[in-house]
Image: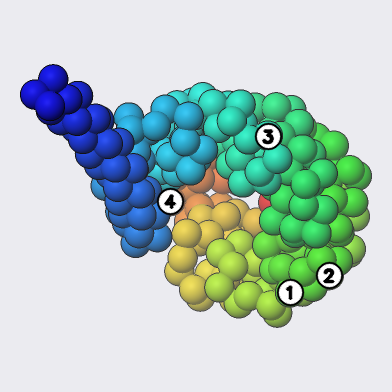
């Protein structure tokens, strides 16, 4: 009987450690998810790291840790962990979306598109996936493709204000100002808090050479006194100059220059300090 006691004790200790390990893993995962939802990403990272130590092949721990690092803007580290999570389970849409989104932030747009396409293969009805893919296409200068992808996002989510906004920007890049303006107007209608919605409507009118209407809209933006103040002064000056209101244009450019808007300073030097009136030049509109 004595020789059995050590064996029983060892078995008991092994069983206890195994149960403790399982309980710890479950606890760390539960707490990690809890604090992640509370936006406490430092604590979430710690919990998921502890979970991964308990079980290095636990998918939930890897994905949770990757997402936590993503939220902490540690994108390269997050991508590595998404790769590790993918090795465990390559059928989870969150892995490919998270990895694709992280690549957007390090400007690896082609890599992001590859991951987003894999995510779309797994969940073809998720408008967010098309929105991110559209952004990547636009950043690569493929505006027609971007418009098609944003349109898919809007088809799946008709109230997707950000998708309307970005589709409008892509159309504007192709100088389809009227069509772009319609999208900007729809975006603002669906979300009046969009930061650049109003000024982009004004810029569209400027591109359409509707100078009086553009001036009216730029004036509304100026009244807001927000982060678009310098741009609004600058582009209102552009519209005024096109209407041969050189003095008023130079006044607006001076205000924009005083707000450190470099293009305004250049215009003052090129046009306001010149004896020539309304020299011919192209307006470069940046949405």
Helix, strand or loop at mark 2? helix
Q: Nearer the viewer, residue 195 or 89?
A: 89
- Residue topped by disc 3: 90
Q: Residue 259, which numbered label?
A: 4
Q: Residue 159, which numbered label?
A: 1
Neighbour tally class for label 3: few under 14, some 14-19, many 20 plus, Cα within 10 Å: few
Q: Alpha carbon of mark 4 to alpha carbon of mark 2: how far? A: 30 Å
Residue at image location 91% in from the left, 44% down from the top? 144
Mark 1 or mark 3, which is nearer to you? Answer: 3
> Considering only order in the chain, which callout, 1 or 4, is on the residue closer to the N terminus?
1
**Contact (CB < 8 A) between labels 4 and 1?**
no
Mark 4 or mark 1, which is nearer to you? Answer: 1
Name, please, the residue furthest toward the top: 3
Helix, strand or loop at mark 3? loop
Q: Alpha carbon of mark 4 to alpha carbon of mark 1: how far? A: 35 Å
User: Residue 97 at x, y = what percent?
Assistant: 64, 43
Q: Alpha carbon of mark 3 to alpha carbon of mark 2: how far? A: 40 Å
Residue at image location 48% in from the left, 29% down from the top? 57
Helix, strand or loop at mark 1? loop
Residue at image location 43% in from the left, 51% down from the top? 259
**Contact (CB < 8 A) between labels 3 and 4?**
no
Q: Alpha carbon of mark 1 to alpha carbon of mark 3: how far? A: 31 Å
**Contact (CB < 8 A) between labels 3 and 2?**
no
> Considering only order in the chain, which callout, 1 or 2, is on the residue closer to the N terminus?
1
Determine the image quadrant of residue 184: bottom right
- Residue topped by disc 2: 182
Against 30, residue 13 (above or below) is: above
């Amino acid at each position: 009987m004595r020789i059995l006691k050590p064996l029983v004790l060892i078995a008991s200790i092994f069983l206890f450690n195994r149960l403790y390990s399982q309980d710890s893993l479950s606890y760390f995962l539960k707490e990690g998810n809890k604090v992640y939802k509370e936006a406490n990403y430092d604590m979430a990272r710690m919990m998921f790291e502890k979970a991964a130590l308990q079980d290095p092949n636990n998918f939930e721990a890897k994905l949770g840790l990757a997402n936590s690092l993503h939220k902490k803007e540690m994108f390269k580290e997050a991508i590595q962990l998404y790769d590790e999570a993918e090795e465990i389970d390559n059928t989870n849409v969150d892995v490919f979306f998270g990895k694709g989104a992280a690549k957007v932030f390090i400007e690896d747009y082609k890599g992001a598109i590859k991951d987003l396409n894999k995510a779309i293969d797994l969940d073809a009805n998720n408008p967010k996936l098309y929105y991110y893919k559209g952004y990547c296409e636009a950043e690569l200068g493929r505006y027609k493709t971007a418009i098609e992808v944003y349109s898919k996002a809007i088809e799946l989510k008709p109230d997707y204000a950000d998708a309307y906004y970005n589709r409008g920007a892509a159309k504007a890049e192709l100088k389809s100002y009227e069509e772009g303006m319609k999208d900007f107007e729809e975006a603002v209608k669906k979300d009046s808090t969009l930061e650049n919605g109003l000024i982009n409507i004004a810029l569209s009118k400027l591109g359409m050479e509707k100078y009086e209407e553009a001036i009216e809209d730029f004036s509304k933006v100026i009244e807001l006194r927000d982060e678009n103040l310098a741009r609004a002064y600058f582009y209102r000056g552009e519209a005024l100059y096109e209407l041969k209101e050189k003095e008023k244009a130079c006044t607006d450019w001076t205000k924009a220059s005083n707000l450190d808007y470099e293009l305004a300073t250049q215009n003052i030097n090129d046009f306001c300090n010149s004896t020539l009136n309304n020299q011919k030049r192209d307006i470069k509109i940046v949405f």
